[in-house]
Every structure is written in C-alpha cells, then in structure tokens.
Image: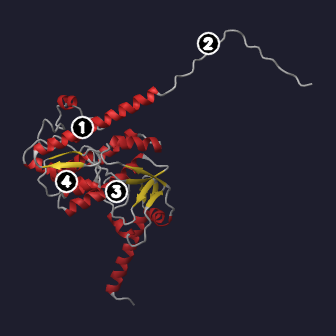
C-alpha cells in the first residue's frame, strides 16, 4: 500500500500531467508563417507569434534548427512544437536594409519583390516600433519567397530588438529611455555622414564635442530626413527648411532618428573616439574624411576639397562634350513613298 504522502505526490503529478496535456492540446490561433530563432532568445515585440516564455524555455531543451516554418492558423501547441522540431524550413531570399535607408524605402523594396502591400507593412511597423525610424537595423534579413506582411515585420523587428536590447543591457541604458533614443539619433547621423566603419567613432567624437560646446552641429545629414532622405543638401534647402531637423539653424540633436542604423554606427554612438575635433570634410578623392580641431585649418581643407571637386566636374563635362562631338550623325531617312507596293511572286517551274 502507498503511504499518504506518496498518494498526494502521485495526485499532484497526475494533475500536473493533465494540466500540461490541456495546455498542449488547447486550440491556438497563430499566423501561418513563423520565424523560429535557433537559440529562442529573440525578444518578442509583436503578437505575431504565440510562443511565450514557458514555450521558449521548454524548447531550449531541444536542438532547434532556426528558420521559417509554415503552420495552420488554427492549431495547438503540441502540433506547433512538432512543426518547430521536425518540419522542413522554408526557402528564403536575402533582403538588405542598407545603412541610412528609410523604413518606407526598405518596405517598398520588399513589397515589390515579395508581392506584398507596403502600406500594410508600414502600419504594422508603426504599431509596434519604438521609433519612427531605426527600429529595424541595417543588416541582412532572410525572408521566405511566399511570405506575408505581419510575419515579415515581426521577424525583422524581433531580430533588431534582440540587438538593441543587448546594447541597452550592456550600457545600462533602458531601451525606452530618452538616453537610448539620443544614442540612436546620433548613430543615424553617423550612418548618414559616412559608410566607412573605421571613421565612425571619429564622426561621433565631433558630434559629442560640438554638443558639449553648445555649437550647432551644422551637418548635412540632419536635413536628409523623411521625404528628404535622398535630397542633395543645397544652400537653398538650408535656408528654406525651418524644421527642428535643420542643424544649421537649431542647436542640439534632431527630434527623431533619421534613418536605419548599423551595429557599427551604434557602437560608435556608445563608444566615440577621444578627440578634440570639431570639424570634418571629405578628402580630395571623396573616400574618407579629414578632421580638424581648428576652424582655419578646416577652411584650408575645405578649399582643397572644392578645388578637387571643380576639377573632377570639369573633367566630366569635357568628357561628355567629347563623346557628344564624336557621335556620328544619325542617318537621314528617305521619305516614305505613298505609292502602292507591288509584290511579285516567282513560281518555280
């Protein structure tokens, strides 16, 4: 005969098993396409996946293969677990979010290639994103050929927030704080100013040094926001733009991140180089930037860059004129005859 304590333990175990069975077999609604992270460490920021903390903890006991799976919209957790563990992953294509690109441009590109509605994706993005721009990081994303809007946005946001959250924890700067938003804004300016990862910390040092001295940033990148993302900054644009994004007129940072940021520009924003630089300008070849702490030295470098730029433009104009001068004239076409055309047929004997 079992003792009283053993009977109680058996009853509790039985209740636990019944509870787990009910949990696994209870009807569940989900999206038809799910992205499963290999380590199940993705920070979930949308309701596009039914997996909760208990599920992700339980699944870490198994060797999970990351990737996309297709499941019925109405299922249960037992079938979902089976799909995660055993179902083949969907074939994917690579979509690249380039540094400095706007979310609208990126989603328009995905919509065109994957035959999705960019406006639906944009509305889902704004529903869950913490920031108008930069909530989806600049990186490569693996997206199924036959995808849908909610799953696509959920995957990219979840993947990006995993990285953003690691920065927040590493530097003790809460993700939803003003301090983190400031770093993201600075990273977006850096991303717009240079694609050279090595000089990003130096660009960051100039931004911080100018802010510390209460100087206007006076950076073209801040005027490349929203619809003006691809516009060439001209003196007229600087004069006519009265928004808070115009760092030639207003001190401090723009109110929002300008565009997407990379891990490199985020690193630079959190770890700027130590320098006394306040100015920078492109080198003669345009491949890097030259930095200065003194305005007079900066002006000399600006002058050299402008001279080199004028020479480059002059060479281009001369090359274009030479090409046009050597293009042979188009052949003169004979006027079309209004007379009827006679067709002669030759019969073989």
**Mark positioned earlier in the residue sequence (1 or 2):** 1
Q: Quadrant of the N terminus?
A: bottom left
Mark 2–mark 4 Cα distance, whole angstroms, equals: 67 Å
The answer to whether 74 is drawn above or below residue 334 in the figure is: below
Front of the two marks 3 and 2 = 2
Front of the two marks 4 and 3 = 4
Front of the two marks 2 and 4 = 2
Mark 1–mark 2 Cα distance, whole angstroms, equals: 52 Å
**Mark positioned earlier in the residue sequence (3 or 2):** 3
State left or right for residue 60 relative to residue 295. right
Q: In which quarter of the image is the C terminus?
A: top right
| Disc marking residue 335 | 2
| Disc marking residue 296 | none
Q: Is mark 3 on a helix, strand or loop?
A: helix
Dividing the picture into quarters, in which one does residue 319 lie? top left
Q: Is mark 1 on a helix, strand or loop?
A: helix
* Residue picked out by circle 4: 202
Callout 3–callout 2 Cβ contact below 8 Å: no
Dividing the picture into quarters, in which one does residue 51 lie? bottom left
Residue displayed at 37% across by 77% down: 13
Mark 3, Cα crowd under 10 Å, few <14 / some 14-19 / many 20+, is many
Q: What element carries label 4?
A: helix
**Mark positioned earlier in the residue sequence (1 or 4):** 4
| Disc marking residue 307 | 1
| Disc marking residue 159 | 3
Callout 4–callout 3 Cβ contact below 8 Å: no
Q: Where is residue 262 in the image (x, y as percent from the top left)?
A: 29, 53
Residue displayed at 19% across by 53% down: 202
Q: What element carries label 2?
A: loop
Front of the two marks 1 and 2 = 1
């Amino acid at each position: 005969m079992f003792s009283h304590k053993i009977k109680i333990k058996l009853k509790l175990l039985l209740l636990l098993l019944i509870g787990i069975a009910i949990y696994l077999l209870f009807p569940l609604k989900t999206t038809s396409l799910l992205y499963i992270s290999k380590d199940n460490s993705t920070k979930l920021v949308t309701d596009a996946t039914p997996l909760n903390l208990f599920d992700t903890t339980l699944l870490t006991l198994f060797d999970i293969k990351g990737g996309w799976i297709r499941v019925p919209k109405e299922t249960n957790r037992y079938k979902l677990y089976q799909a995660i563990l055993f179902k083949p992953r969907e074939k994917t294509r690579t979509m690249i979010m380039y540094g400095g690109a706007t979310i609208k441009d990126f989603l328009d590109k995905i919509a065109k290639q994957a035959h999705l509605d960019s406006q639906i994706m944009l509305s889902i993005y704004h529903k869950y994103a913490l920031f108008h721009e930069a909530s989806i990081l600049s990186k490569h994303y693996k997206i199924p050929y036959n995808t849908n809007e909610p799953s696509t946005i959920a995957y990219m946001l979840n993947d990006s927030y995993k990285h953003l959250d690691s920065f927040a924890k590493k530097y003790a700067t809460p993700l939803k704080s003003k301090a983190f938003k400031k770093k993201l804004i600075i990273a977006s300016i850096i991303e717009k100013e240079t694609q050279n990862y090595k000089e990003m910390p130096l660009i960051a040092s100039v931004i911080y040094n100018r802010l510390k001295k209460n100087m206007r940033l006076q950076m073209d990148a801040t005027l490349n926001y929203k619809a003006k993302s691809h516009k060439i900054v001209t003196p007229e644009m600087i004069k006519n733009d009265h928004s808070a994004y115009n760092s030639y007129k207003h001190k401090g940072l723009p109110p929002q991140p300008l565009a997407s940021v990379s891990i490199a520009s985020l690193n630079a924003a959190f770890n700027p180089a130590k320098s006394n630089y306040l100015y920078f300008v492109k080198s003669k070849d345009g491949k890097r930037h030259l930095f200065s702490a003194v305005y007079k030295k900066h002006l000399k470098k600006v002058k050299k860059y402008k001279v080199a730029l004028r020479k480059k433009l002059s060479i281009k104009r001369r090359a274009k004129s030479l090409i046009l001068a050597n293009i042979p004239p188009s052949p003169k076409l004979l006027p079309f005859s209004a007379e009827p055309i006679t067709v002669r047929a030759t019969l073989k004997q």
